[in-house]
Image (cartoon, rainbow, N blue to C red):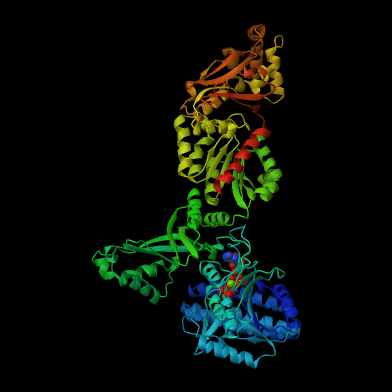
Amino acid sequence: MIVLKFGGSSVANAERIKHLARLIKERVLLDEELCIVFSAMGGVTDALILSASEAASGNEGYLSKAEEIRKKHLETVEGLLDSPAKEKVLAAVNQDFDVLFNLLKGVFLVQEASPRTMDYILSFGERNSVYIISAYFQSIGIPSAYVDARNLIKTNKDFGKAQVNFKLTNDLIRTHFKQHEESVQLVTGFIASDVGGLTTTLGRGGSDYTAAILAGALDATSLEIWTDVNGVLTSNPRVVKNAYTIAQLSYDEAMELSHFGAKVIYPPTIQPALSRSVPIYIRNTFNPGFKGTYIGKDIQRADRKTITGVTSISDISLLTLEGTGLIGKPGTAARLFNCLGVHKINVIMITQASSEHSICFAVMSKETKTATRVIEAEFAKEIENEQIKPVKAETDLSLIAVIGENMKKVPGVAGSLFKALGQNGINVVAIAQGSSELNISFAIRRSEEYKALNLVHDVFFLSENKRINVYLVGLGLIGSTLLRQIAEQYKTLLHDKHLDLKIVGIANSRKMLFDKSGIDPANWQKALDQHGVASSFEGILEAMKKLNLPNSVFVDCTANLEIRHIYPNILNQSISISTANKVAASSEYSFFVELKRLALRNNVKFLFETNVGAGLPVLSTLSGLVESGDHIQEIQAVISGSLSFIFNNYKAGRPFKELILKARELGYTEPDPRDDLSGQDIKRKIVILSRVAGYPLEANEVHVEPLLPQSCMEAKDIEAFFKELEKHEVYFGNLIENAERKGAKLRYLASLKNGKASINLVEVRADSPFFNLARTDNMIVFHTSRYQERPLIVQGPGAGSDVTAAGVFAEIIQLGSVIF
Ligand code: ADP
Ligand code: ASP
Ligand code: MG
């Protein structure tokens, strides 16, 4: 005998039922001996609860809710059957719903739905779905019979979640099946009855359990649970997109996973199967060709992963009982858990510090009040004598459980788990590890649940993809180039480095768009146009906070002067920063230090490599020297691409103005060339270089020798500026002629010496490394204790959107290797 169970989504409508009937028919033709359990049609149990609770609160809306349920069933009959069977079934279903309507009316009148009434009301779901399915099976020639599980499964009177009397039940099941060997028995899931015949239920999701009870009683060769996902996955696929099917699970692991939130199996299901060693298969009705998950003995794991799955239970509370009265008093814990047990309050997790001064445990949120009340009643005397404090309750928490048999005796699992949580700013409120070492559970704020599940999943399922979430602000030349580069490289990164680089937010000064499932970097413009909303710094911060994604980086490709003010907040959200914007790192020294401190405290990075020399490895080289103990004696640098171009091309006889116009035309200068020629940009860069070199320099301490006469700087617009420049051709002409006469060239050089920075127009001769600079090249020359005789030189194109974007891109990838 094989017992199969089909869940709510597998029987959600006529089409789904036809689909599963085809699967069954094939197997009947193979002469398989089957018993099939069905749930109520998808959503019906919830709808019944809703309708009944509206009725109980005197709300007439219950009627339309119930009418919808009836309609759903009648439509399904219409879709499945032809006359005359159709009319017969329609009439029977209608009649049954009349009973339900009367019942609901009663609830409405007395404004009360007791657990006993509720169980009866809920039974309409399973009874009608199976009744309809059995009529359909018979109409297509599957020899089958409708079985009301209330005649087979006997329980106590714990309505809502009744306890099974296995002795009675097993006997009834075996007798029934002996008498009905000829046809496929179609059994209502979830419902049962007490010995007196009152309807009970086995708890939400209990159809799985019905199937397991049958499988156990009948010593089935296997139990197949058919649902809407590819088996038991490494985590809930609705929350963790990277989750994948676990091919094999031990009974113990399956039990832990289901107890700690893997809704795909109802927790009590495992026990009856385990006690008879019935193997369980979890299969997908929507993907019947797929093997799914096998749960049983002698499992074999191809991969040697330490962790099997990560689950969560949302909405729990942590209660703490604390006081000197607990120390060294045997029996206190027993009293505590006994009084909770008497009131049927399920304790999900327990921790006790070795000082015995407090006991902390988790219950479902909805039970917080009752739990507090019953404990305070139990310990009333001790509380009055101040030996024990009143119960402390922390609400709005979630429990995450990391589960796996291979975890046993493997050191470091908890270490890497809590390190990752810490790095992502997730505070752990309580921790428990069972001595079986099968499970580490911990409580966190509920708002962090999504983030924690995804993070923990990424940490432990290393061979799968590691995801980095990117927020990109600034979609001009550099930002859009970066997006293009990411689009081009995405597949390679995923394939070769298992790095899943997701753009989860983009913004410019007008619009912003956030999407945790990712924005296509090849089509971002369209997405932003269509779905973007008005952008603001507050909006960006708020959206990132709301998404609360792990392993995130904020990329600043703007030239905005104010955006730096949101950096502290970003770092405090445990989001790293990679910025091409020089403003933050070159603003007040105290602010720069604060950013570094916040990054350190929050275990994230504040990166700004592209601030000097764009994609060239300037700052990383410099900090590498400093961190390894070298001393920086002097830095000389040409660090402006535009000024490099201008002076590399300046020759006696060539009008200076014409050269500037040319640079501007080639896009090497800002629209107003004075932004480059003023030395402001170079100043920022030498400040940053100095700081990385270990000197706490402020921007106003940099001595700048102006390149342009004052009148040029003061000209009211660009046109006036060029006019003014013409008047100074003689001045510039003299400078270059003088230099050439000495065999020298002109360079606008930034330097740092003895902790002092300056920017000067200098003449360099053939023996200087700066003599042969070409095009828009940058050159940074480091004289250090180690590089004394011959300096260390970094040279190359130091401007342009391609190389700058590539520099930022490299930084993001580098973050990937730091985070994981
Ligand atoms: P059914 O109606 O078939 O009984 P359920 O809704 O009770 O289906 O259970 C299946 C659902 O369980 C999936 O759709 C999924 O959202 C959820 N789920 C939670 N954790 C897991 C997990 N680890 N693996 C698979 N599914 C899970
Ligand atoms: N229909 C019941 C529920 O929704 C039982 C089940 O589907 O397993 O809880
Ligand atoms: Mg279920």
Compared with 458, 193 (above or below) is: below
List x then y, in percent, for residue 76.
Answer: 69, 76
Which residue occupies 47% across, 84% down?
A: 156
Q: Nearer the viewer, residue 113 or 8?
A: 8
Instruction: Name which quarter of the figure residue 652 lies in.
Output: top right
List x then y, in percent, for residue 46.
Answer: 56, 72
List x then y, in percent, for residue 349.
Answer: 43, 66
Q: In which quadrant of the rendered image does the N terminus lie?
A: bottom right
Which residue occupies 64% across, 50% down?
A: 500
Which residue occupies 59% across, 57% down?
A: 461
Horizontally, residue 431 falls left or right of residue 202, namely: left
> Can the viewer see residue 669?
no
Compared with 719, 265 (above or below) is: below
Q: Nearer the viewer, residue 126 or 245?
A: 245
Horizontally, residue 200 falls left or right of residue 334, namely: right
Instruction: Name which quarter of the figure residue 210 lies in.
Output: bottom right
